[in-house]
Amino acid sequence: KRRIGVLTSGGDAPGMNGAVRAVVRMALHSDCEAYAVYEGYEGLVNGGNMIRQMHWEDVRGWLSRGGTLIGSARCMSFRERAGRLRAAKNMVLRGIDALVVCGGDGSLTGADVFRAEWSGLLQELVSAGELTEEQIKPYSVLNIVGLVGSIDNDMSGTDATIGCYSSLTRICDAVDDVFDTAYSHQRGFVIEVMGRHCGWLALMSAISTGADWLFIPEIPPRDGWEDDMCASITKNRKERGKRRTIVIVAEGAQDRQLNKISSSTIKDILTQRLGLDTRTTVLGHTQRGGAACAYDRWLSTLQGVEAVRAVLDMTPTSPSPVITIRENKIMRTPLMEAVQATKDVTAKIHAKDFQAAMTLRDPEFKE
Ligand code: F6P
């Protein structure tokens, strides 16, 4: 029987458990054995009971659970070749030749490097006397399939990452709560949301809550934005009678010179220029934990099933796929193409070519 491993890596995201559940059950359904690798790549490097065989009932009730029940870690040793050698040895000893990795672009890139090095790693293990030719014979190829798990929705090539809609829902609930108190005191609130270098959570939550102003990394405001923001907020309050003011700022927000725009800077502007009683709220990790929303439950399930199908379809020469969703269709995309496209967007932003960055995301984008 084929043995398929599954691990979660990088920042946890709601829906990761649903993905593990689907991979385990689809593997069993396809007459394979399923193995969970605990604590991300650390489990692969350390082996032992950090790699555990999973049965149908082991993942019962996992669909809605937040976080990742098999753990995640930012594993430094897997970044070194020595760590990957140990990982390769553990996989051969356990008879696992396919790995489904659920994580962000960094974690998925690590998986692809592992795959590219695989036969070299095995040869080195044989030369070092750690494995025999006989032992490595059945494992000439390592199959890697990626699932994008991240609240940030920052991967190119897919419309949604596993976890982003749960996080968005949580942010909207929090902003609604802040609305009540802001309304009561006629206050301003600057709410900082996660997303690393990506403004998706900030943009979508601002639209979904009817916020007054928004800052995201991809489209830094034009010089003089302080005046524009103050004028718009004044109009909303004075002419339209709005009692509360909400400004949403992505944690990666920056100006056109790539200087960080922080929530405290915005608060100071509103306080000093408008005399507005303003508070800041940094939502932090409440955005990442908690139950998966319905979207993430079905997305993780369908993508987990597709990941196992992809493992079974792979040939020795096919590139590692990442499972995506585009226009509501579950699809496979070459993993490194999606990672490269993600990096291209970041590079354009670093080069201050914001229009080009957005055009990569959406060819019809116009500022
Ligand atoms: O990638 C998910 C994320 O929550 C980002 O939005 C955030 O920038 C980062 O992880 C926080 O990482 P940590 O939990 O390690 O502080």
Image (tube, rainbow, N blue to C red):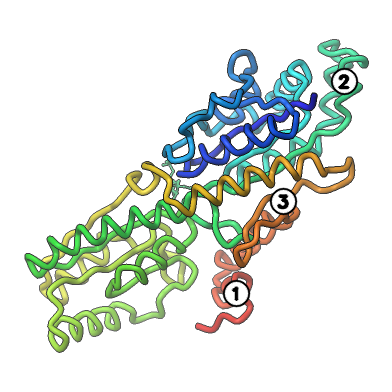
Left or right relative to 223: residue 82: right
Along the viewing direction, whichever of 242 and 272 lies nearer the viewer: 242
Q: Quadrant of residue 338?
A: bottom right
Q: Residues within 10 Å of mark 2 (few under 14, many from 20)?
A: some
Name which residue type carries label 2.
Ile
> Sequence-wise, which precedes: disc 1 or disc 3?
3
The numbered dot on residue 362 is 1
- Mark 3: secondary structure: helix
Name which residue type carries label 1.
Asp
- Mark 1: secondary structure: loop
Q: Residues within 10 Å of mark 3 (few under 14, many from 20)?
A: many
Q: Residue at x 64, y 37 (%)?
A: 23
> Sequence-wise, which precedes: disc 1 or disc 2?
2
Left or right relative to 332: residue 103: left
Disc 3 CB within 8 Å of nearest ligand 1 atom = no
For the residues labelled 1 and 2, the Cα–Cα distance comes to: 45 Å
The numbered dot on residue 335 is 3
Name which residue type carries label 3.
Leu
* Quadrant for the N terminus in the image: top right
Task: Determine the residue located farthest toward the left in the rendered image.
Answer: 185
Q: Position of residue 198 (x, y in %)?
A: 49, 60
For the residues labelled 1 and 3, the Cα–Cα distance comes to: 20 Å
Task: Kindly identify which residue carries mark 2.
Answer: 136
